[in-house]
Image (cartoon, rainbow, N blue to C red):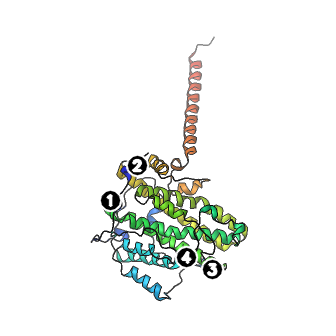
Amino acid sequence: MAMTCMKFRPILFCSSISSSSKTISTIHYPELPNQWTGLHNWRHSSLNHHRFWGPNGPEIIPQPSNSVKESTLLDSISSATCLAEMGAAVLCTSDPLTKSKLSHLAYCRWIEEGLPVGCYEPPGRPARPDKPQLVPPKEIPSPKHSGLSLNVYMLHNLAHVELNAIDLAWDTVVRFSPYSDLLGDGFFADFAHVADDESRHFAWCSQRLSELGVSYGDMPAHNLLWRECEKSSNNVAARLASIPLVQEARGLDAGPRLVQKLIGFGDHRTSNIVAKIADEEVAHVAVGVFWFVSVCEKMGRTPCTTFRDLLEEYNVEIKGPFNHLARDEAGLPREWYDPSSSVEDKQNKLSQVYDRLECIIAMEKENSSLDSPHQ
């Protein structure tokens, strides 16, 4: 089914930016039903500088710039005049740890200085380091043939996901910045916040990999995540459906299983990091649900039907098993992604109707027997 009326056409660089600037406290968010109860607190939480994983969890560790190249990249953030320009600078940074630092600096400037969203053209694709080598998913070595221990193998895969997630969030900010008047500043504030969270997650993964004697890039990885992102480059509704509501929701499904595997392997430090990341991903899925419903309202569309139609149109596959509890917490309705749940709901409702009918019939029989004259 063609969904052309849902598409926001991309436009090129917009030289002028909005003269107004807003802080998080003054941003207006639309009132929507059934949203995650923690969304307000997440939006108004203090800046999170806990980018080092200490003995007892996240800590603040100052990490000053140590190179001329990094200092130059930091200047690209400090000299930017809007959020979209800072997001583009992050996307154009190839070194993973520097990308992580710039992402945090960009979000901090946005919060502390109240810069406008602005308007900027994103790069065709994010800058990437020479390693890891990107190969088709089928060519990713199995744990047995990777040369890495199982816990390192799983952690490296997660680090790759988190690095891509930084770019996915910033690309959403920059690519759709021409539509800030339509989407509202809250849309961009939320996805810049997501990018900041993801950059912190990557920093934790990178640190732990180093502690285990390896580096991000020591095994091949795939480019499937970014290919999925490219599909929705001209449609904000499709971007919301395919990235936060499918890809990030998979993190809610896989997180607890990964934690248990790491505990079974005996790597409790890594399992604690993964558990914290999985817990924080609930907010990201909730953000996707919130803005998908908001965009559907603006278009006069039904969210459930629109979600399914978009996945079919853009050939996005949803795979189980599902962590229904985490998805429910994020406000992602089961009937959107799990057709069997709607069938079960209908069967349950029919069963309840049958039970009530049986009860009514039984009562009527009893009443008629009471009214009948005794023989």
Q: Position of residue 20 (x, y in %)?
A: 28, 71
What residue do we see at 43% from left, 57% from top? 290
Q: Which residue in the protein does label 4 denote?
A: 130
Quadrant location, the N terminus: top left
Count of numbered circles in the view: 4
Amino acid type of the residue that numbered disc 2 sits on in the rendered structure: Met
Q: Earlier in the sequence, mark 1 or mark 3?
A: 1
What numbered label is drawn on residue 57? none
Q: Nearer the viewer, residue 227 or 71?
A: 227
- Label 4: element kind: loop
Above or below, 361 against 235 in this view is above
Q: Which residue in the protein does label 1 denote?
A: 182
Quadrant location, the C terminus: top right
- Between the C-alphas of marks 3 and 2, the distance is 46 Å
Tell me if I can see residue 236 in this picture.
yes
Q: Which residue in the protein does label 3 denote?
A: 210
Amino acid type of the residue that numbered disc 1 sits on in the rendered structure: Leu
Q: Nearer the viewer, mark 2 or mark 1?
A: 2
Q: Earlier in the sequence, mark 3 or mark 2?
A: 2
What numbered label is drawn on residue 3? 2
